[in-house]
Amino acid sequence: MVAVRWLQVLLAAVLLGGCTFFFDVQDSVQSDPEPDSRQQRIIFERIQQITQSMKDITRSEVSNIGPNEAQSGPEKWTVCSRGSSGSELRYFTFFLKGETVANWRPAVINDKCEARRFSPF
């Protein structure tokens, strides 16, 4: 009886693990081309709206679109923004999906925002 129960648990683990693996592979295979100029305009307008809504950030700038260096999400493309907060610069990373900003957060070292070129909105 214990052996039968063990085989059932093992079979369930293999089946569930296989499904999870299958869906992860399918999501990573889909291509996400770099946004074109029309999409970029929409993206930059949205980022400008978000940064203007931040209370203590002034003189915001935006970077070019680049690859997701940190690999911290499923999105392939990112944009960095920087702005003054008192006497220091603060960086933010925006994750792109098509022409939308899927998510954003304060930048981390792996985003490599400091290495990008910035320009005013």
Image (cartoon, rainbow, N blue to C red):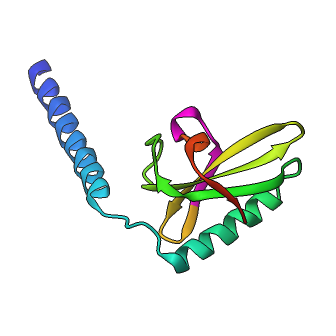
Q: Is residue 107 left or right of residue 60?
A: left
Residue 109 part of the magenta-drawn span: yes
Q: Nearer the viewer, residue 1 or 10?
A: 10
Q: Is residue 44 left or right of residue 18?
A: right
Quadrant position of residue 62: bottom right
Q: Position of residue 36 (x, y in %)?
A: 47, 75
Q: Residue, x 61% and y 75% (percent of image)?
A: 41
- In the image, residue 49 sits, relative to residue 38, either above or below, namely above
- In the image, residue 57 sits, relative to residue 53, either above or below, namely above
Q: Position of residue 1 (x, y in %)?
A: 11, 22
Residue 37 part of the magenta-drawn span: no
Q: Residue, x 65% and y 68% (percent of image)?
A: 44
Quadrant position of residue 64: bottom right
Q: How many marks?
A: 0
Q: Residue, x 46% and y 49% (percent of image)?
A: 68
Q: Is residue 6 left or right of residue 90?
A: left
Magenta part of the chain: 102-111
Q: Residue furthest bottom?
A: 38
Q: Position of residue 117 (x, y in %)?
A: 60, 52
- In the image, residue 46 sits, relative to residue 68, either above or below, namely below
Quadrant position of residue 18: top left
Looking at the figure, which quarter contains the C terminus?
A: bottom right
